Amino acid sequence: MADAWLAHNIDPLISSAVFQKDGLLIIVFDEADGSDASHGGGRVAAVIVSPKSKAGYQSATFYQHQSTLRLILGGLGITTYPGQSAQAPDMYEFF
């Protein structure tokens, strides 16, 4: 069911000329269960889709949601980051 939803909704997005120019799609999976409280809530997987990202790249760096916010704001050209995103590691290694 998820495969069909992705094919119907996400494939047209990432195939579009506008997205292929400089698009960025970040999919975050929060699948931590209640027994995993490391770093405030366990591990969360993220998939970064962009024509500018490194294909198949996997990082060993520890990131939190503040880094994702920093990446999104940086992509929009915003250089002043709010709260903890100001000190969060950037995610530019994916590009």
Image (spheres, rainbow, N blue to C red):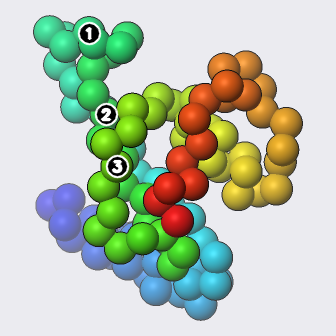
Q: How many marks?
A: 3
Front residue of 23/63: it is: 63
Q: Can you say whether 6 is above or below 80 in the image?
A: below
Q: Is residue 13 visible?
A: no
Q: Please give the name of the residue rendered at 60% of the width and 72% of the height, measured from the top-left corner.
A: 23
Q: Is residue 84 visible?
A: yes
Query: Which is nearer the N-term, disc 1 or disc 3?
Result: 1
> Circle 2 sits on which residue?
44
> Circle 3 sits on which residue?
59
Does residue 42 appear left or right of residue 19 in this picture? Answer: left
Q: Please give the name of the residue rendered at 59% of the width and 42% of the height, measured from the top-left corner.
A: 90
Considering the numbered disc 2 on the image, is that residue within a helix, a strand or a loop?
A: loop
Does residue 65 appear left or right of residue 4 in this picture? Answer: right
Whole-percent x, y for residue 89 in the image? 57, 35
Q: Please give the name of the residue rendered at 35% of the width and 73% of the height, measured from the top-left corner.
A: 55
Q: Which mark is residue 37?
A: 1
